[in-house]
Every structure is written in structure tokens, then in C-alpha cells.
Amino acid sequence: MSGNTFGKLFSVSTFGESHGPAIGCVIDGCPPGLPLTEADIQPELDRRKPGTSRHVTQRQESDTVEILSGVYQGVTTGTPIALLIRNEDQRSKDYGNIVDSFRPGHADYTYWHKYGVRDPRGGGRSSARLTAPVVGASAIAKKWLHQKYGTVFKGCMSQLGDIAVPFQGWEHVANNPFFAASGDADLIARMEAAMDELRKAGDSIGARIDVIAQNVPVGLGQPIYDKLDADIAYAMMGINAVKGVEIGAGFAAVAQKGTEHGDELTPEGFIGNNAGGVLGGISTGQDITVSIAIKPTSSIRTPRRSIDKDGNPVMVETFGRHDPCVGIRATPIAEAMLALVLMDHALMHRAQCGDVQVTTPDIALTAPR
């Protein structure tokens, strides 16, 4: 099976399965001399890991990361960095009833038809468990980008099902289980009640996640087929359960007039950011703003119609421990993919044009709409 490597100069190859002994990745292309220990990586994994609240899967994984190579005396050597995360709480027996049938909405059907074999335990390679090594790799990219350019990444949930979450400030994101940028206690309670009701009903819901990168240098990205925004969209669609990507104004641009959408420039900088920080496929120095739409979790307890490997009709019930909304833990993953794209493009730009300087346009558009 190919297709397990992301990136060109900063490439990340993941390995492992949801219920195998371990998962991990090999990162090739990290510049030498970056101070790095497990303590730089673990906080990002802790943000993503399961079992953090009653609203997500209760699979108990510490997601403790081990650096196996590529670091000597506390700094990167420029050689491949291998990260290992051991699986600690597999319950493979929960999937015994789907060995010969396909769960609706999952990759079961397509994997089996493409490869003639599949790992039914938690979805194997198609499991969102494989986002953990990617988040680990992104911690390295985030650190390098921050040291080099001061780049920072922020994300939040802006919608849970039909519940809109107005942006009130980044300081609220860490204070609730939804990564919501809201300090409205009543709204958070409403979201929690909605999740409790879904879990009792054996159903699920989708979500919208907004993520931004600030202090991004001007000039990242290359026309025509290596555009920065094209690679961002490609990366976001590589996240499990993502069904839509918006950059900048996104689909709202359909209803905008040219006088409204085109971001005017003044000697002080841009006066808008409908472009989402990218023009002609190249970064403008403004915030990169991205939104993703995440579908409802396909693993639900409600019996659903399907077929078995022989094409016979069956009813499928999905057991095991699953998030009623996979979007709850998606914010760190979306940040991770954005960081990997910017890291890759920063190295490509450096190779082609040399180092770039950060410019921070004098605009206030730092929050998602």
C-alpha cells in the first residue's frame, strides 16, 4: 500500500494500525540543530489523545511518544527522526462481528475491494488513531517555524451540528472539552447536553473547525501546481472524516461582490483577508485562515443496513468505543496538517530563494469568521 507519506522536503511517513502493537512515523528532512526532546512533542499529543472527556471515545491511551532516531545530545542531526507511540488499550474483540461485513460510511468496503484484504480491528490504517503520529510530527514543524519566523498556530470549533459557536477569544479554547473559543457557560452546557443526548441515542453529529497560522512569511507557495492554498486543501482533505475545506472567505465568496471580496491594500497593509492569506498560490504575510467540515461519526450503535463479502444483505451494529463527534478532537489535527504544509513550503522556499523575512501587515483580522 502506497500513499503513506506526506510532504516533499519535510516528509512524514506514518506506520501502524489502530489495534497493532504501536503506531508512529518517520520524519525526513528536518533541519539539523533544532533542540528537541519528547517534552517538545508530548503536549501536542496530549491535546489530541482519547479519553479526555466523557464526550469522546473512552479508549485509554497515554500516547506517550518515544524518539528513536535523528536526535543526538538534545538536537536534531538532519537524519530521519523516528517517533513511536505504543498502543495500550486495544479491544479487538469489539470488531469480531464485522470481519465479513462492511460498516456504512467507513473505508471497509473500498479497502477490501481495492486490496482484497483489510484489518477490521478499529479500521486498521483507516482509523483516526493514525492522526497521532502526524500530530507528533507537527510539533517539530511548529517548533522550527516558531523559532525561525515566530509562526504560531491556533484552532477552535466554530460549529457543533446545528449549534453555532461565536468567536469570543482564543483564551477560551483550553477551558472546555470542545476547543470552543467561547466563554459562554450556557452555550458550553448546551453543547454538552447535545452530546449526551446523541450518545444515549446511539447517533453522531458533524462539526466545523477553524484554524489559523499567524506570522507567516510572505512568499511561501509556488504557482501553478504547487500553490500554497492547494496544498493546504489537499492536506486537510487527508484528515479522516473531512468532507469540505474553505480558505479565507470560502463559499461565502459566492455571495460577495468584487468590491467586497478583493482585499484592498494601503501603505499600512491589507484592509481585509478574504483571501485567507494566500494570493496566486503564494502567502501574503497575513494570517492563513482555514475551515474544515467534518462529517458525523460513521461508527454508531444504531443498526444499519449493509452487505457482507458475498453481497448478501446484513444488519451491522458497530460496537467499541467511539466519539459521537470526531470533530471534538479534530482541532489539534487540523493545526498539525497546516503546520506540516507551511514547514514543507518554508523549506522549499529556502531552497529556491533563500531565507525570507516575516512581515506582519497592520490588520486586525486574526479571528475566524
Image: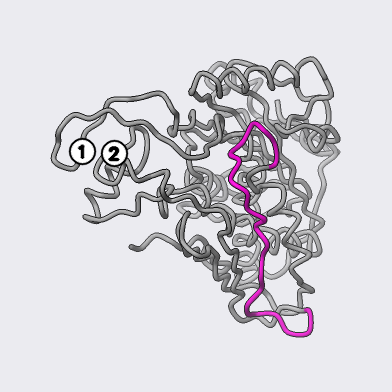
247, 305: nearer the viewer = 305
Residue 186 in the image, given as x and y percentages of width and height: 79, 15
User: Which residues, given as a range, are shown in magenta?
Assistant: 52-74
User: Distance from label 1 to label 2 (Cα)?
Assistant: 6 Å
- The residue at the point 45 percent across, 29 percent down is 300
Placement of 279 over or under 24, stated as above or below:
above
Placement of 223 over or under 233, stated as above or below:
below
Local packing at callout 2 (Cα closer than 10 Å; few below 14, some 14-19, many 20+) is many
Placement of 141 over or under 324, stated as above or below:
below
Residue 291 in the image, given as x and y percentages of width and height: 60, 34
- The residue at the point 47 percent across, 54 percent down is 18
Residue 51 in the image, given as x and y percentages of width and height: 65, 43
Residue pointed to by mark 2: 102
22, 111: nearer the viewer = 22
Residue pointed to by mark 1: 308
Mark 1: amino acid:
Asp
Mark 2: amino acid:
Phe
Q: Residue 83's image quarter?
A: bottom right
- The residue at the point 83 percent across, 30 percent down is 169
Contact, mark 1 vs mark 2 (Cβ under 8 Å): yes
Residue 45 in the image, given as x and y percentages of width and height: 68, 54
> Which quadrant is the C terminus positioned in?
top right
Label 1 element class:
loop
Q: Does the stretch in magenta take in 8?
A: no
Q: Residue 75's image quarter?
A: bottom right
